[in-house]
Every structure is written in structure tokens, then in C-alpha cells.
Image: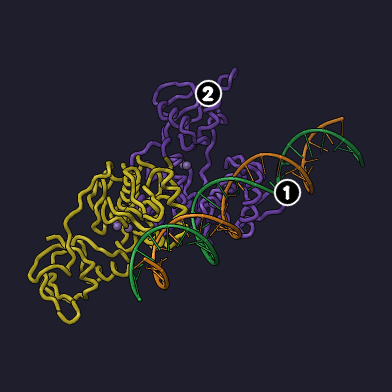
Chain colours: A yellow, B purple, C orange, D green
Amino acid sequence: MITSFTEENYLKSIYHLSPDEGTAVNTNAIAESLNTKAASVTDMLKKLADKEFINYIKYQGVTLTPLGRERALNIIRKHRLWEVFLVEKLNFKWDEVHDLAEELEHIHSDLLINRLDEFLEFPKTDPHGDPIPDKNGKFNVPELIPISRLKNETLGIISGVREHSPLFLKYLEKTGLVLGQEITIKEQIEFDGSFIISIKENDIMISREVAKNLLIAI
Amino acid sequence: MITSFTEENYLKSIYHLSPDEGTAVNTNAIAESLNTKAASVTDMLKKLADKEFINYIKYQGVTLTPLGRERALNIIRKHRLWEVFLVEKLNFKWDEVHDLAEELEHIHSDLLINRLDEFLEFPKTDPHGDPIPDKNGKFNVPELIPISRLKNETLGIISGVREHSPLFLKYLEKTGLVLGQEITIKEQIEFDGSFIISIKENDIMISREVAKNLLIAI
DNA sequence: TTATATTTTTAGATTAATCTAAAAATTATT
DNA sequence: AATAATTTTTAGATTAATCTAAAAATATAA
Ligand SMILES: [Mn+2]
Ligand SMILES: [Mn+2]
Ligand SMILES: [Mn+2]
Ligand SMILES: [Mn+2]
């Protein structure tokens, strides 16, 4: 079954909005994430249900069928592999690749993406630390914890972000908070919830907002 | 001015159908090359004329404006660079890349394509011997002559094809008639216009149809 | 549990790209 | 030059994706 650019974006959005397999995603949430209107979403949900990509009960939200989940993961695989390509081979920065990958993820060819995977030597994560599904849609989610939930004196490695905006990513880069960097939590300031962390022998301060969006492997 | 996938295919088609800058391209020719109907073409021509990509006079056919030509060459540049990438980096065969490049050529990013160009070390021709415009749209057309127009005992190098169908390309590959291969014209058979050529110390026979579509640099 | 607020769906339009059938213009042929 | 053939354009519909405004269903609060 072929899927249009638009249908694929809906599937991806539903996948990203699903906290877990069972719980349904609301019409309004999809509308917001795709910058469209609820009425448009309803129309598309009917279409996706017809094509058996989603389970849709009027007024009750939607869940992905196994087929829909498979398709969503295939698009996410493509997105993340293209991001790796852009950073590793074409020297793009991690804050520059997302919008391009949003276009490239819709190129329809399993052969192309499997060859690209091989060319990149089967990367396990993308430039933002997100896991890349393999050709069967399998991937393992590493246990990452935001700095905001860590205790003092914890030592860990920066391994992911919860926020992908170029502004945030550029700030992290400038501050040296890049993937793979080892850090230690020194102290949380009670007043505003900000943190002092140590990075390469230096102590630096990061806001609570940043601490919530920086993911650590311990 | 942004252009849709469809508009870009029309511009490319008009470019490829232009024998030279001045002479106009007919509605029916465009319709045939895009597998669409003349009525649809007329609608699109009005739109492209509004956007100043073409000069359009009712019933008189169209020519590209400098803007339209620039845009067409940019798409062709992308098409051919992606073909080089697929063959050189992802190990595709020359008969497998065209349809994929038809999709990839519509990815909108000059930065991406210039970085790709650099990554590929600024190739001058694509896997089929066609010239790749540089970022300013400049390219030189090498003087290539079909085998069918060569005299006996001519020595030359296979440097291009006039027909891009996978069937033809696969036949050439199997027969050893690949780009860069040196050949000598031995004899033309008067009866059916076929040729005997020498390649790597062997004499082989090729039909007139093949001879017309194989381009040689002398 | 009735009234109010929120969410979701339907009804009806719009826009881009396409089509068929018919009309108009151009080109070729007597 | 008049007629026939061909090419091109217009008229009117269709389909996918979107929208606004109104109606219907569900959730929340008095
Ligand atoms: Mn991304
Ligand atoms: Mn990413
Ligand atoms: Mn091609
Ligand atoms: Mn080519």
C-alpha cells in the first residue's frame, strides 16, 4: 500500500504522540503537532483507518495497527539515517539536519535506505542520540535520565536530548554539552531549580529548563 | 519563488525538449513526455507563465525564460549529482539510479546539493556521461558522436548514451560497452546497418539501433 | 444530575492537479 | 482559397488535502 507524504506525516505524528502501545492519541494533539486543524485531522483519520494503518473509533482517539506502527518506524528509520549521513558525510551541524531529514524521509526506496545504512556502517543512534530502528523495525531504547532527576555527585555521559530545536542544540554545542561528553552533577540551586555541573574540570551553571531536556546515561 | 514537485517536472521537461534556446516547445510534446493530457499541460503552462518561468503565447508553444532555465538546470544538477552518489557511494548500477534520482532531485536545499557536490569531489559527468551543471548552472557539452555516424577504422572512447532505459543500459553492461571503454569501428553491414566494432581485442556485432544510441568521444 | 465547557465530527468551500468532451485556432491538403 | 486534419484551449468535473463555521458527543463542574 503506497502512502502519500501527508499520510506519512500523520503516521509519524501518531507514533510520536503514543506514550505506549495501548493508549489512544487525541485528534487535537495530532492537529497541534502537525500545525493543522482538528477538522482536517478527522478527515485524514478516516482515510488512514480505511487503509488499516490505525484503529479509529469516533470521539475515542486512535492507536496504530501493527501495519501502521511498522510504517511509522520505517519513516523514522529513514529520518534518522539521513540525519547521520548529513552530519557524518556532509559536515552538517546537529542543529541543521532536522528539516532536511523531514524531506528526505519521504523518499520511497527500501533498497536505498538499506544501502545507506550499510554505507554509514549501521549506526545505532542518530546525531541527537535517538535510536535508529533496523530494517526489521527493531531497536533498543537506552535508559536515559534528564539531569533534572539526578542526585548530586552523579557521574554520567550526555547521550540524548528531549528538545530538538536548533536554538537549544546550538546553545548546547557552544557550551560544550555535546553527545559523549562526561559530566558530574555538583549541586542543585533550590531557588530556581538550576544546576551546577562539572564538565572538563570546569563548573558551569545550567538552567532547570536545560536540565530537563538534557539526557544522561549513567 | 517556490516550485512544486509538479512544476519542477514541467520545467525539466520543457528544458529537455528544447533543441536550442529560441525554438518553442509544443503542448503535445510536453504532454507525451510527462504522460499526461494536453489539457492539463495548458493549465500548467498558464501557471508557469504567471510565475515568469516560461514565455507562453497561446497556440504558439513555450520557451523558458532565463529564470526558468536556471531552475531547470538546478533540478538537472541535483538529478545527476544524486545519480553519481548512488553509483559511487552506494554501489548502485547505472541502470538502477534514474527513478530514484527523479525523486531526490526535488529535495529543496542548495546547501545540501553543494555539500554533496563537494563530497563527490565535483564530478563533471553523471553515470551516463551527461554533464553536471555547476552551482552557477555552467557546464560544457562534450562533442560526442553516435557510432552510427562514424567511419571505419575510427578509434574512440565510449562516453555517453542517448537512451537511458534500464534494458539498454543492462545490455551495454553485459556486452562490456561501458563508459571509458576504448573501441574501434571495423565495418558497417550494408544490409541492416549494423556495425562490427572491436573491443578489447575482440570483434563484436551491434545493431544499428544500438549504434545510434552509443556516443563516442574521438 | 443537570448545566457548562471542551473536544470532535460534519457540512460545505477552496485550491492544486488532473481528466473528458467540446470548441477554437492553426496547419496541411485539395 | 476553401476544406479537412491536427493541435491547442476552454468548460466543466473529480480527487486529495485543507479550511471555517456549525452541530454533535463527551467530559467537567455546579
Ligand atoms: Mn530530526
Ligand atoms: Mn534526530
Ligand atoms: Mn537520470
Ligand atoms: Mn543520468
Residue placed at 62% from the left, 44% from the top? B30
How many C-alpha atoms fall within 10 Å of the one at disc 1: few (<14), some, or many (≥20)?
Answer: few
The structure residue drawn at horizontal position 9% and vertical position 67%, both measured from the top left corner, is A154
Q: Is residue B123 visible?
A: no
Amino acid tagged 1: Tyr
In-image side of B117 versus A160 (left or right): right
Give the mark, 1 or 2, whose residue is nearer the N terminus: 1
| Nearer to the camera, A204 or B210 | A204
Pick whichever, B36 or B110, lies toward us: B36
Q: Name the residue rendered at 26%, 63% in the picture.
A: A162
Image quarter where the N terminus of chain B lies is bottom right
Q: Is residue A210 left or right of residue B158?
A: left
Residue bearing the label numbered 2:
B207
**Residue C1 coordinates in the image, percent (x, y):** 37, 66
Q: How far apart are the alpha carbons under marks 1 and 2?
A: 40 Å
Q: Position of residue A144 (x, y in %)?
A: 17, 59
Nearest the eye: B15 or A182: A182
Amino acid carrying label 2: it is Ser
The response on whether ligand 3 sits within 8 Å of label 1 is: no
Q: Which residue is mark 1?
A: B59
Q: Is residue B207 above or below residue B46?
A: above
